[in-house]
């Protein structure tokens, strides 16, 4: 059974940092690309960052490039894999629910992702 569990969200002042984690379990996630999306109130869910299965390729939305970093640790023997999103220099417009997702290949498109977590709230105060 595939399961994605996000954590690390919270309230932070503008200019601060947060690190989100996504514990991913279940085959075949060790060979899947992983992505982060976010959804602000009244807006559509948007792409934030993605990383390929072995961590060698990363992709970012222009709005977060240079501030956010995605990384992953693949566990052995189908134990939980972990994906991180380090968020620095946070801005009020980064406020959203952040979702972890898994796809067969790296993609910036929401429709390409097969599995989703429940999301974690990030609030950046001005």
Image (cartoon, rainbow, N blue to C red):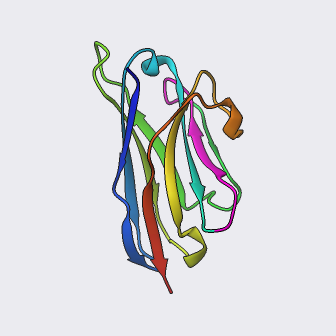
Left or right: 77 as drawn, with respect to 11? left
Q: Is residue 19 left or right of residue 51?
A: left
Question: Percent from the top left, x then y, of residue 18?
Answer: 39, 63
The majority secondary structure of the magenta stretch comes to loop
Instruction: Identify the image quadrant of the N terminus.
Output: top left
Residue 57: quarter of image:
top right
Q: What residue is drawn where x is 55% and y is 75%?
A: 91
User: Which quadrant of the view contains residue 106?
Assistant: top right
Does 126 appear in magenta?
no
Q: Is residue 72 above or below residue 124?
A: above
Q: Position of residue 103 (x, y in %)?
A: 58, 27
Q: From which residue to which does the magenta span run? A: 42-56
Is 51 colored magenta in this rendering?
yes
Farthest residue to the top: give it: 77
Left or right placement of residue 8 versus residue 114 in this view: left
Residue appearing at x 61%, y 73% in the figure: 93
Which image quadrant is residue 92 in?
bottom right
- Percent x, y for residue 42? 67, 67
């Amino acid at each position: 059974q595939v399961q994605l569990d996000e954590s690390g969200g919270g309230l932070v002042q503008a200019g601060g940092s947060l690190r989100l984690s996504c514990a991913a379990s279940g085959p075949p996630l060790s060979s899947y690309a992983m992505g982060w999306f976010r959804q602000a109130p009244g807006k559509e869910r948007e792409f934030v960052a993605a990383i390929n299965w072995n961590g060698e390729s990363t992709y970012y939305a222009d709005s977060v490039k240079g501030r956010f970093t995605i990384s992953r640790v693949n566990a052995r023997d189908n134990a939980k894999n972990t994906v991180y999103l380090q968020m620095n220099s946070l801005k009020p417009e980064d406020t959203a629910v952040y979702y972890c997702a898994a796809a067969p290949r790296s993609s910036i498109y929401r429709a390409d992702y097969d599995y989703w977590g429940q999301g974690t709230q990030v609030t950046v105060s001005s």
